[in-house]
Image (spheres, coloured by chain):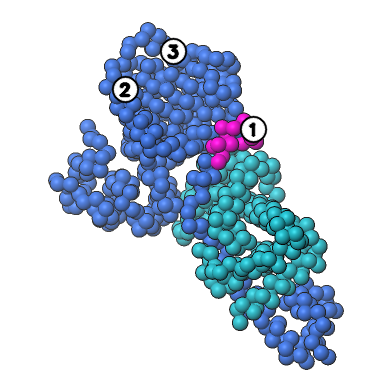
Amino acid sequence: MNRIQHPENLSDYVDGSLAPAASRAVEAHLATCAACRSEVESLRRLHLATAALPREIAPARDLWPAIARQLHAAHAAPASPSITSFPAAAFRWLVPLAVAAAIALLCTIAARRPIPARPGDLDAWSVATMTGTPRIAARAIRDSAPFRVGQWLETDSRSTAKVAVASIGEVRVEPNSRVRLVGTAAHEHRIELARGTVDALIWAPPRLFFVDTPSATAIDLGCAYTLAVDDHGDGELHVTAGYVALEHGDRESIIPSGLKCLTRRGAGPGTPFAADAPLALRAALEAFDFGPAAGRGKALDALLAHARANDTVTLWHLLARTDGPQRAAAFDTLARHSAPPEGVTRTGILAGDAAMRHLWAAALGLGTFE
Amino acid sequence: MTHVARVAAPLDFVVTDSVDDDSELVRRAQQRDPRAFESLYHANLRRVYAVCLRMTANVSQAEELAQRAFLTAWEKLPLFRGESAFSSWLHRVAVNTVLAHLRAEQRRTSRIFGTDDPARFETPPAAPPAGIRLDLDAAIAALPTQARAVFVLHDVEGWRHEEIATALGVATGTTKAQLHRARKLLQEALR
């Protein structure tokens, strides 16, 4: 017998897609034809090489910012109804630095401004409809309505509302959110975010505006941030100007502008991280903060290995969340990226000296501690 | 659900209960939670980008098509019923996105050259695009467009001829011939 007339059959044979009779015929032919045997061997080598190809290839750049911009643009354009419910809050981090700087300047100026004592401040806030039909105490708001202590403000998938926080700031309530006014007084204004997303812009002095969530309380230290809470009560905070503190029990995180922080029901706030932190660092941090205790050591190793000069705030928080050799490793990594200031020693930090930790925080631009 | 897997990363301590985690993320993304969708993006990007890059052999086109695939996935996500794994569904969306692009390219080339066989006018890339380092990947990148698409779908992605033929709008005889052609060219390139 000569070589098979239709060489495609050899491809099919190697693929195992020939009918049994045709397959037997090819095998009979191969027994007598060295050229076809060689061809089959070559095809099998190609199959093996193909099977060994990596199934994943990382692009040279992160595509998410471009995707997020387009989703945001589509959200803004009513011509694309299928994605109109995409919350704009998710893209707040795309605000150019110049805008963020302008907001920061506004906050700085406003923080120096005395808070006007307006009649009615302590009675109710004002809510204005931005899109759709938000509801207060289950009643639809047409244009605006008072928001009283104890009432719930709710938005559905198409509605957003703007809340005037007494005279100290504004909170935009994004779609699918549920917010309660807990209390409003000269020394404290407090809301509860049960689920959804709020964008807060506060121009009061620090520690006047509080947002309770199922997993932590956000304390405004001045002055712009986005806080989102999912149906489980877990949250994510992204600070775009100034500082925010997250507290739960005796656990506290300080989040400066440009950083994010996750919160988990029952666990409280995690460790803040730069919004542009590498995925590997974020995964390690999440495992360290919220994963099983047995895996924390390994997570910390990965975390420290991925830490960059831009992650000093993250590393500083670890000083109070580790002990023994883990704290020593955190100290050494932080010291590599930012030398400890005068008055801060390795021995002191390893011994848990809070004053030294606070000195270092001030040197990192995290503010001063009382 | 474990929170760790919300951020995909090649860390061996990450708990890999990905089916459950995907389901939860998909459910949240279907309810228009962009953070959940961003997690799905991170978990699937490299797989999606790989098929876009292999089928186009062009970095900028692959990036653009991967973006387009995720945008399409977001738009169509409410229609996803969970009958297959999310990653498989997304992968199918990506392949369809690339095929639509290739068909548009073919129509454009056909108008320009007045032929139904644009492969005749194709110039193989001079060098493999960035991200492709293996000899075989470089040889795949140098294949004519349609032969490359068929080879990637059949031999790399494991699609059947019937599926490829339906997606390309051609007969299975055509996809078999293209696959044969691709394999011959690769065998020669790798000798």
Q: Earlier in the sequence, mark 3 or mark 2?
A: 2
User: x, y (%) of residue A303?
Assistant: 37, 54
State whether residue A219 appears in this view: no
Q: Residues within 10 Å of mark 3 (few under 14, many from 20)?
A: some
Q: Residue A276: percent from the left, percent from the top?
A: 41, 47
- Residues tagged by mark 3 and mark 2 found on one chain of the structure: yes
A158 or B16: nearer the eye? A158
The residue positioned 48% from the left and 37% from the top of the image is: A91
Looking at numbered disc 3 in the image, what kind of residue is underneath it? Ala
Does dot 1 land on a helix, a strand or a loop?
loop
Which chain is indicated by disc 3?
A
- In the picture, the disc for residue A79 is 1
Identify the residue under disc 3. A124
Q: Secondary structure at mark 2?
A: helix
Q: Within 10 Å of the Cα at label 2, are there few (<14), some (14-19), or many (20+) other Cα atoms?
A: some
Foreground mark, 2 or 1, reads 1
